[in-house]
Every structure is written in structure tokens, then in C-alpha cells.
Image (spheres, rainbow, N blue to C red):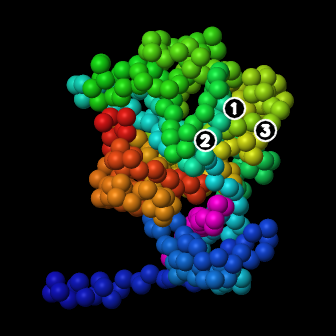
Amino acid sequence: MAAALMALTACNKEPEVLVEVSVQLTHFGEAYKAVAPVTFTSAVASYTQNSDENGLASFKVPAGIYTVSASFKEGNTNYNGSTQFTVEKTYVEEKPVELALTASNSSALIIKEYYDGGCKDNAGTKSYLYDKYIIVYNNSDKEVDASRMCITMAQNSNTQAANKYAITDGVIEYEVAGWTPASFGIWWFQTEVKIAPYSQIVVAINGAINHTETYSNSVDLSKADYVFYDKESGFNLAAAYPAPDASIASSHYMKTYRFGQGTVWMPLMANSAPYLLIPEEGVDITEWVKTASNFDQRGTNGSTNYAMIPTSWVMDALEEWPEADETKYFNRFPAAVNSGYSLATKNLGYTQYRNVDKAATEAIAGNKGKLVYDYAGAVSEEDTDPSGIDAEASIANGAKIVYMDTNNSANDFHQRKKSSLKK
């Protein structure tokens, strides 16, 4: 009887209806001919197909609300596109869904590693939050002058309800206007900063001190190259901005202009959107931030007072979400800056670490025999560096590393379970 009931139930269950949908890659309104991965993503599933040589991809998917996206690189140019599309059970295709691509160039200066999620205190009961840092890397074979580079973050919003800008067909309002918001403050250097090829600088966002002396799970930032430290700006909470280690020259204190509220320039834990920018020639950022016309006030207080950074100034960005939920979170960057997101976990000392560009790294003369494989530093087999190269071990072995830079955080980052600063 039980077997008969199971058989009857199976017979009565309606088969899932799959709907045929085609996607055409476009650029400046014309079909873009490229073989590239195209993805349909809903709240419950994701489907990926390569387009054919004409840039056309075909899918069979269940009815639902989807984000259709593509991200790939040709030469030194990144192509990213994203749009939203609803598939009804009764959908009949009249023409392919057009997926407009935005082209942008890779930058020599990139975010190699970012830590903002905090760690557990020694008792394992509370979180320690004031040990944030960012590592900026020269991803090229030539020295880079980073003296005019600045660091900031995009909208400090984590839900669609908190977002102050309209999103139409997957395109956020300020993308059309040609600018990217900066929240609370923009930090800049006081001195000349040169970064050698395939080298980095460590910037302490909070506390250029050895945090491990009090919290063993934390990091030692006493040897940071630069530090956010400008108490006269209004960012002066003692816990967040202790006096930097005596070994760090005051000329290496980064300065800012506070146009937001609060006493801490505080990225959201595991949900922030940091980025690097260099103003165009002739623009003095110290004066630019004091000009009222460069800001867009979208609320009643400083939390929604955004600096309108021209998107052409942006060098690199990271979009991180604490979970894959598009009903709660949204991409805060224009497509020319970044598409996609990297998942982040708070309170466990994990960092966002850049994936290695395997082909480019293996092609560097002198790297053979120095590269270390079988990378085991990621938090899981799913959230890992697909190259399989252990970047930090390879660097210690004398290798030079080229990191991925597709302007898509989903492709470019993974979670590292231990900071690269913890040897």
C-alpha cells in the first residue's frame, strides 16, 4: 500500500516547466561577438552557459525572477553587464534578452586583501572590531606612483530599503549620472608613495598597533606602512584610533575630511564596499571635499551625505555581502567599476583575499619552480582561489604574483581563513 501511495504521489506531481530563453551580449547597442560565460541567477538557483561566437547564449530555466549577468576579460579590458529579467511560465521568446556590457580597463593598483569582519576575543564570547586594514598592491611590472591615491567606501547601506537611489533594470541611478558615492570621508596620503612592481603597502584602517598583545586572534598592525589617523577631522573615538606605533612616522598618517556623521569611519562588518581612487590631474582632493556642489544629500543627516566621485577616478573596488540574498543587498558600484559580490563572514578573522591570475603568474619569467600549489588557506572548497596557487607561500619563495582583476568581486576574491599578516 505504501508503495502504491508513493507511486500515486509521483504520478500526481506536476513536472517542472522549463522555459527557453536566449541572451545576446551587446556593446553600444550592437551585438558583441565573444565566447563568454553568461549566468542566470535567482534566489534559489544559478545557471551558466557560454555564449557562442556571436555572443548568444541559450538557457532552459524554471519560471522566476533572475539577474542575468556576464563578466569576462579580453586583453586588458574587462567586460561586465547585469540586468534583471522575469521568466513567466507562459513566456514565448520574440527576441533574445539584451545584456549590455560595460568596458573598463584593469588598474595597476588593486585591493589585494581587506579585513573588516573582526575576530573573537580571547574568551571567544565577544567580538573585537577595531583591527581593520586594507592592503594595496601594485599588480604590474612597473613602479607606480600612488601619492595621489585615496581610499573611501561606497554607500554604507545594506538593504534595498536603506538604498537612497533608484535601481532600474539593474542599473543604479548614479551609474547613469557618471559618479560613484563616497561615504563619511575620503582618506589621502601626506607624503610621496611609490609602490615597486608586484609589491604592496599595508594600510591600518583602525589602530596601527599590535592588536595580538590583547587579542590573540587579531593581527599585528604595528608594522603597517600607513594608518588612518586624523583626530582633528572628527574621527577620534579612542578605541578606534589609538596612537600609532612609535615606529610609524607621522608623515605616514593618512588624513581625511569628515562629511558624514559619527566619530569613526566605520565600514559595515562583512558588508562594506571599499574602493581606491585617483583624482584627475589638476584636482586637489583636500579642496575638492570642501566644495558643497560635489555632494549629494539624500537624507536629513551625514549618513546620507554622499561625495559624488566621478566614476572615471575609481581604480579598484570590492563589493562584499554577508549572504547571497538580493532581496536584502544590492551592488553599490556602477558596472564600469565592479559587478558581482564576494561573500564575507564576520567575527572569525577571515579576510577578503584576491584570487591569483594563474596564466599571467605562470607566464612571468623566473617564476617556474617558485610557485607553490595546493592552496589550503581558504575557508572552504567552494569559497577558494580557483587557481590553486598559494600566493603568500609563493611570494615567500621569491615568486611574483599577478592577481585577478576582472572588476567583478565574485571572480576576483575569496575568503581567506587567516590574515596574510599572520605568518
Residue pointed to by mark 3 = 280
Q: How many badges with numbers are in the image?
A: 3
Residue 93 counted in the magenta span = no
Label 2 is placed on what type of residue? Glu
Decide which of 299, 249 is in the foreground and name it. 249
Q: Residue at x 35, y 22 (%)?
A: 211
Q: Main secondary structure of the magenta part?
A: strand
Decide which of 345, 194 is in the foreground and name it. 194
Residue lying farthest left?
A: 1
Displayed quadrant of residue 298: top right
Q: Residue at x 71, y 61 (%)?
A: 102
Q: Is residue 351 above or below residue 299?
A: below
Q: CA distance from mark 2 to mark 1?
A: 14 Å
Q: Residues within 10 Å of mark 3 (few under 14, many from 20)?
A: few
Q: CA distance from mark 2 to mark 3?
A: 19 Å
Q: Can residue 63 be seen here?
A: no
